Image (cartoon, grey):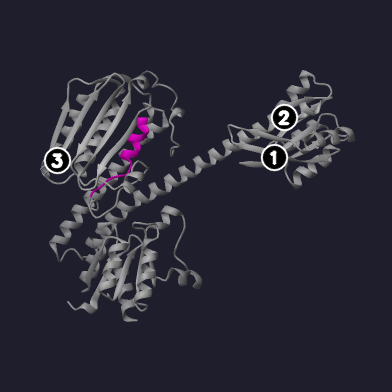
Amino acid sequence: MTTDKQILVVDDDPDCLEQVAVVLRASGYEVISAYSQAEGEEILLRTQPKLAVLDLMMEEMDSGFVLCHTIKKLYPDMPVILLTGVTAATGISFKSQDQRGRAWIQADVMLDKPVRPEELRTVVARLLAQ
Amino acid sequence: MDHSLRILVTDDEAGMREGTARALSRFTTRFEELDAAVTYTVETASSGEEALEIIERQQPDILLLDYKLPGISGLDVLAQTQGKVKEMITVMITAYASLETAITATKQGAFDFLAKPFTPQEVRAAVRKATNQLLLLREAHRLAQEKRRIRFEFISVLAHELKAPLNAVESYLNIMHSGLASADPKTFEHSVTRSLVRIQGMRKLIFDLIDMTRIESGTKARNLADCDLLEVARSAVETQEPLAADRNIKLVLDAQAPVVALVDRAEMEIVMANLVSNAVKYNRDGGTVTVRLRQTKSATRIEVEDTGIGMSEKEVAKLFGDFVRIKNEKTRHIEGSGLGLSTLKKIAGLYKGEVSVRTQPDLGSTFTFVIPKEGETAMDKPRSSIPTPMATY
């Protein structure tokens, strides 16, 4: 496995993390796991993965957003996928259609949990091909 | 807190309007128990029509309303504002304070009466009384809104907590369905095992929710009787025995039998089951759980000590809230609904008792549930005596 296929997956729910990892590994990617925003930041300081898949709500309500901003500051070209199960919890949809909303969120793609394996694979492949 | 209230004086006699306005212009009321000082601005209207116009434009807080007016009467004004205008206190001014008038006006929503002619002292006393009523009304309104907010928040979090295991199971099924797991028996096995664990967790959440609803709703009659807590503890320990044995955790029951208290047995079963199961879940492999039952003249104490991961001060601060789960690298693989300890706190409230914790990171925690004796006789009081504002749903 070459390091240019490394993907960082950050989620505080071990099942969600495992599920994303299974799908990505089956597609030939190498997965680096982190269970929190803090752990994710630590990993990003010593290595630069090709792409990141982040959960939104971890130790804080907005951990995913914050981590996303950190990534874009360190590695502006690294694609970020943000996973949210938040819609049902707050009644607020973070899926932003307009330009301003997307610019603020900074994630390249937002996906609602649970994510279907084909959808995740397709999105990852598309982002890495760009 | 300081308030400025608007008073509208409606009277067809100019002298009455001016006199009343003068009596209230530099008037301040203080309410020590509400920690409030109230000042007033006074507006006047000479007819019922004019009063309605002013009310429509900007609602006053207190309406001093003459009963007999040239056009529409004071009662008509009352009738037209009732239901539409909220949080306005109306004081009727009347020269003929007949019982019949009073009854009609009260039915229409008037709060108080002021008999003509009145002195400045009398109108100030009436305004003070109306102000007190208004502040109480606002406070009640604020509390009701707060209760609604807490309920909404509770339901939002509950929805999220129910959705999480559902998502997890659905994703595992998706993985199996897509054939990703068939290549690797380990992945398949893991998917099935984890799905079962998450479904069990979801069931536990629903059961905990039912326990909590029972305790909070007050619909289930509490059955207070002498109950041997040692028996309840023994049963809780037995239930946890297999899980504890798997991880080589020793369960110790330390009590001088029997420990009889006047309690609701079902509530004590919830308390004991939660404390013992937490002590096992958050213990280290090979650790010990000690359940201690002690009785003094004034109280019965249930103490459950573990040799587990312990907690930081910051974690303890939020421990007894609804859906609070302490999340860190040590608790990552521990399942829980986050309702157990908040339910215990609510049960403690029913007994005017308390539940507390002493803890040290990596050394362990001791949870203490205290049932005061005097509380035991006063227990079947209404549920509204529970001190903390609680989520209801």
The residue under the point 27% across, 45% down is: B336
Secondary structure character of the magenta stretch overall? helix
Element class at badge 3:
helix
The numbered mark at residue B85 is 1
- Amino acid type, mark 3: Ala
Q: CA distance from mark 2 to mark 1?
A: 12 Å
Tell me: B63 left or right of B384.
right
The residue under the point 22% across, 27% down is: B293
Up-down relation of residue B297 to residue B51 (above or below): above
Q: CA distance from mark 1 to mark 3?
A: 63 Å
Element class at badge 2:
loop
Look at discs 1 and 3 and give the one toward the viewer. 3
Q: Residues within 10 Å of mark 1 (few under 14, many from 20)?
A: some
Of callouts 1 and 3, the N-terminal one = 1
Residue at the spot of label 3: B244
Q: Is residue A76 visible?
A: yes
Residue at the spot of label 2: B110
